[in-house]
Amino acid sequence: MASAIKDFSRLCVHTQTTRPWDLKSCVENYSRAGIPGITIWRNVLENQNLKEAKKLLDDHGMTVVSLCRGGFFPSADPGKREEAIRDNLRAIEQAAAIGAPLIVLVCGADGRQSLERSREQIAEGITRILPAARDAGIRLAIEPLHPMYAGDRSAVNTMKQANDLAGLINSEWVGVAVDVYHVWWDDTLKTEIERCGREKHLFAFHICDWNVPTTDFLNDRGLMGEGCINIPEIRSWVEEAGFRGFHEVEIFSTRFWATDQKEYLKKIKQAYLKKS
Amino acid sequence: MASAIKDFSRLCVHTQTTRPWDLKSCVENYSRAGIPGITIWRNVLENQNLKEAKKLLDDHGMTVVSLCRGGFFPSADPGKREEAIRDNLRAIEQAAAIGAPLIVLVCGADGRQSLERSREQIAEGITRILPAARDAGIRLAIEPLHPMYAGDRSAVNTMKQANDLAGLINSEWVGVAVDVYHVWWDDTLKTEIERCGREKHLFAFHICDWNVPTTDFLNDRGLMGEGCINIPEIRSWVEEAGFRGFHEVEIFSTRFWATDQKEYLKKIKQAYLKKS
């Protein structure tokens, strides 16, 4: 089993977890709550001066863990694929500007074409943005998404596929983000996490829980301990695989967004200590 | 690619597909529409005299393809597991009474315990009801369910797991039901269908489509051709694996249930010919 979590030194919260808050509110409240890590979703950077955003983060001593998200490479429409490349290059610039060392890739899918074709386009897309990422010193993490998103959000749906893709691209700048929500059901998870560590591309670890029942495809994630995911066990595999980075709390929840976000942050900290 | 479908000789419709209809309406309307096969959901047998139901089916020359559904074996509560056994034994009696040669098993899961434990209990459950099934001449089909149901409806989520389980039980009475809705996303699908045929336990084939986007976890399935599943390709794999049984249309759809069911049946026939 996993060792107990004793403090908040490796806790990171995604801005999307506290979606009602803008960047400033996230930074101030996370900082005040003793949460050292932040993963920044691009929506909170809209209409922001990135230098000021960087200063805000620095002034509060926040560690920017990653920028969410790049990706969405595949399309049956070649024009859309070019647009995706441009958008990913902009994401790399944003990540560099705010000091994010990593971009999480939600790879994309297009139901009008086969999953195989979408995966080829994902590999092409990552390969095309890789030089810019390397030049900027930004790593890219392929995040396998749950198979329920294979029609529209990601053609990469298992750790094996993510590991295969990272292996194919074969760059120290390209790795994998493990999000328990997407992969907990997979009976090859443990071995693929071990492989991911062995191949030196385990870049990120995201936590939340799977509610039983789950009522919405996007925004009904649970707080750690509320659902059925064996989070401490998966964390132990990730740690045995050599991962020493942040534990990122990424919860999309209409239910929690409707509550007081400061109280919610307390619940997150409690659930992190006891149920992660 | 698959050969074209030329007629309705292998078309079967699940009573749940036309949920507003009772058994009599299903039988009369399917028969009138020239649909020879019917899979009967147990809800339409409630408060029915099974001899009369059998006579109704025979009088209309319907082929009963299967009874849906048995299963739901796992539970953290031993009492519930015994209850599940009793319920499955009743299902076997019902299947025998109405002339269904097969019961589809939605295996079940319990989020309070590990998926491995639930799978053990599924194997135990099937093993326990197997003698009664064999005595009644009823085959049992393990249906792998989409990973989005791993928390509550099935701990068997891939064709590989279903094949492994059927292989473990190792009886000519226990096989697998392939439903495209649950398995289309899996990159091992083709090889596992081949294996399923080779191991002589490919018992059933269900079709519908995956809507993009899908808005409900249970009742937003698409008519063939509406979504992103490569149905003719998967059918070709199933046929190459030696399957010669019915193509069963199993669509749960709040949208279609709200429409005129006779018109809907016409749409099903058209989609079956052109998009399956």
Image (tube, coloured by chain):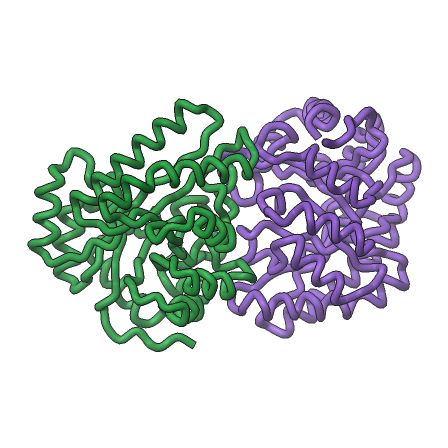
Chain colours: A green, B purple
- Residue A269 placed where, x, y %? 26, 65
* Residue in the picture at 91% in, 35% down: B61
The picture places residue A3, in percent across and down from the top left corner, at 35, 77
Left or right: B35 as drawn, with respect to B271: right
Residue visible at 77% across and 34% down in the picture: B26
Image coordinates of residue A48 in percent, x first then y, are 14, 37
Q: Does A264 appear above or below A157?
A: below
**Total label count?**
0
Q: Residue at x 83, y 56 (%)?
A: B139
Quadrant showing the C terminus of chain B:
top right
Decide if residue A259 is in sight here: no
Q: Residue at x 40, y 48 (%)?
A: A142
- Residue B242 or residue A218, whichever sits in front: B242
Of residue B6 and residue B199, the one placed in the foreground of this image is: B199
Residue nearest the viewer, comparing B176 with A87:
A87
Is residue A62 visible in the rendered image? The answer is yes
